[in-house]
Image (cartoon, grey):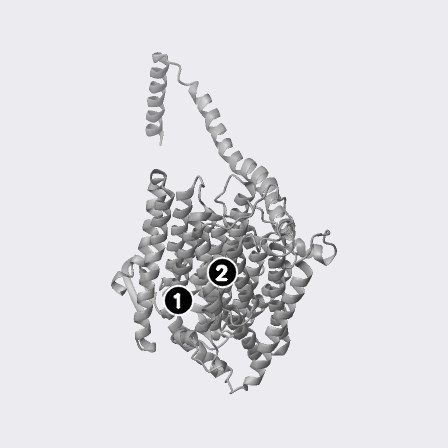
Amino acid sequence: MSDLFYLVTLLPFAGFLINGLLGSRIRNEKLIGTISTLAVLIPFIIAVIQFTELLSMAPESRSILLTYYQWITAGNFSVNIAYLIDPLSITMVLVVTGIGTLIHIYSIGYMHGDRAFAKFFAYLNLFIFAMLNLVLADNLLLIFLGWEGVGLCSYFLIGFWYEKKFTGDAAKKAFIMNRIGDFGFMLAMFFIFTNFNTLDVSRFLSGIPSFPVGDTLLLTIALLLLLGATGKSAQIPLYVWLPDAMAGPTPVSALIHAATMVTAGVYLLARTSLLYAMSPTASQIVFAVGLVTSIVAATIALRQDDIKKVLAYSTVSQLGFMFIAIGSGAFWVAIFHLITHAFFKGLLFLGSGSVIHGMHEEQDIKFMGGLKSKMKITYVTFLIGSLAISGIPPLSGFFSKDVIIFETYLTYGIPLLVLALIAAAMTSYYMFRLVSLTFYGKPRYDQNKIHPHESPATMTVPLIILAFLSFFGGVIGLPGLYHAPTFLKEWLEPVFANATAVLDTLHPQTEHSVTPELIIIAASIIVAVSTIIIAIKKYSSKTEFPENKGFNKVLENKYYVDEAYDKVIVEPIQKTSEKFLWNIFDIKIIDGAVNGIARYVSNISFDWRKIQTGVIQDYAGVSVAGIVIILLYLLLF
C-alpha cells in the first residue's frame, strides 16, 4: 500500500482544487460535499490498510521512509519531500482522516444553504492536506510547511463568516498569536541545522545522544520547540486565541480546535521525545505549563455561558493534560489522551453545533433548558461525551486521564497529583453544569419564537459514531493493571524506545504495588461522580441567573487576561506605531527624505532650465567660450 500512499495527501489537495476552482459552477451541495468527503475518506481507507501492514511487521522494522523528490539543495543543505510512515505518524493520520471524514459528513447538513458552501469545503480539504503533511513529514522544514498551512487554514475558517466583525477579529488574533510560537519553531530549526547539519528529524534525533544530559544547547532547542507547541496547542501564555476562534462555524471548532490542529504541538513534542528525555529541565517546564494551563482554563470554564466557549476552555484544559503527560515522560499516554480527546471533544463540539442548529443559532446556555426530550439523539450522544471527558468508567476518557494522573504521581509526587485531580474534578463539574443548563429543567427560551428540533441524519450519524468511539475507545490503552495487553503502548513503543531508555537510566523504575494505582483510580472516580452529582443538583432546575460578583466575575471575564494583553502589549504597540513609526519615522523621516530629494532635484532642474534659451547664437557663444577655456588650460598647464 506504500506505493499508493502519496494519495493520502494528494487527494485532499485535489479536493481543494476542484471545489475551490469549480465549486461555484457545480453548485450542487450534495456533489460538492461528496467530492470533499471522499477526498478524506479514501486516504483514511489507505491509512487503515497501511496500519494493518505495519502491524504485521516486526516492531523494530515498523518504519517506512517514502522519498518523492529533492525539494531544496544549497551547498550542504538539502531537504526532500519525504514522508515517514511509523506507528506515531500513521496513528495521527488515522485520527486526522477518520475524525475529518465524520466532520465533513456533518458539515454537509450544518452548512446547508450557506452562500459559500463550496469554499468552506475547499478550505476543509486544504486544512486536511496541511495537517497530513505536518504529521507525515520526515524533516522539520516540511513539518513547518504543514504547521504554517494549518495556521493559514485556521485563519480562513475562523473568519469564514467575514461579514461579522468579531469573526475577522478572532481570525486575526489566532493568526498573530500563532506567529509568536512559529518564531520559536523557526529559531529551533536554525539551531538544529547549525549544530546538527540537518533538518531531518531522524538524523537530528540520532545526533542527540552525543550530547550530555541537560546540555544547554539541547535545553535551548527544547524550549524553542516548546514555544512553538505552546502557540499551536494553546497553552499559557499563548492560549487566548482558541476561545475566540469559536467565532467560526461549529465544524471548524470540532476539526481544527478539538481533534487536529491544536494537537500539532503535542505531536511535535512527542516526535522529539528523545530531546525532552535528555533535557530534564525542559520536561519540568512542559509539565508546569500543562498543569497551570489545565487548572486555569478549567476555572474559567466554570463561569462561561456560551456553549462553545465552555468547550473551548475545556479543550485548552485537556491539552494541558497532554502536556502533563509529556512532562512526566509518559509520551505514549499523551498520544492516548490525544486520541480519546479527538473522540469525545469532536463529539461535544458537533453536539453543541446540533444544539445551536436546533435552537436557531442561540448559544447562551442560560436561554436553553429542557432540550432532553426535544433532541434525544443529540442529548444521549452529548451525555456520553460529557461522561467520557469527566473520566467516568468504562468510557475512553477515564482510561487516558487515569494514566496521566498516575504518571503525575510517579514522577512528581502527591502534591502535584492533588492539583491534577482538582483540574479533573473541575472538568466534570463544568461539563455537567453545561449538560444540566442545556438539556435538563424547564425551557428558558421564548417558546413562541424558538422551536427546538433534532438535526438531520447527516449531523446525527457522525454524533452516533463518535459516541461509540468515546464509549469504547479506551480499550486501545487499557493499563496492565487490568491484566490486558496495553495495545497502544506496545504499538508506539518503537517510536519512544530511545527516550524511554534515557528516562529509565536517569530514573530507574522499580516495581510498584498496584495499591497506589487502585487508590488513585478510586479517588478519581469518587471525585468525578461527586462533582457531577453536585453540578446536576445545582443547575438542573435553575431558572434565575444573578449577576456574577467577586471572584466569579473574574472567572466570567477570564481573569482579564485579554484586557491585560491589550493594555500591556497591544495598545503600546499601536501607540508607538501611530505616534512614532507613522507620524515621525514614516512621514517625517522616510517621506521627508524622499520628498526632499525630489524637491531638491526639481529646484536644480528649474535653475538649469534657464540655460535653455532656444537662441542659437547663445549656444554658439557658449561652445566657443568652452573651446577657448580648454585651449587656455592646455597651453598654461
Q: Amino acid at mark 1?
A: Thr
Q: Which residue is mark 2?
A: 228
Q: Quadrant of residue 579?
A: top right
How many residues crowd mark 1 within 10 Å: few (<14), some (14–19), many (20+)? many
Q: Which residue is mark 1?
A: 91
Q: Closer to the N terminus: mark 1 or mark 2?
A: 1
Residue 405 or residue 199, whichever sits in front? 405
Residue 436 is situated, as x and y percent measured from the top left of the image, at 62, 58
- In this rendering, is residue 326 above or below 239? below
- As drawn, the residue found furthest toward the right would be 550
Which SS class for mark 1? helix
Q: In the shown orientation, is residue 356 left or right of residue 108?
A: right
Q: Quadrant of the N terminus?
A: bottom left
Q: Quadrant of the C terminus?
A: top left
Q: Quadrant of residue 80?
A: bottom left
Residue at the image position 37 percent from the left and 54 percent from the top: 129
Residue at the image position 54 percent from the left and 49 percent from the top: 356
Residue 232 or residue 275, whichever sits in front? 232
Residue at the image position 41 percent from the left and 67 percent from the top: 195
Q: Does the rendering let one see residue 184?
A: no
Q: Amino acid at mark 2?
A: Gly
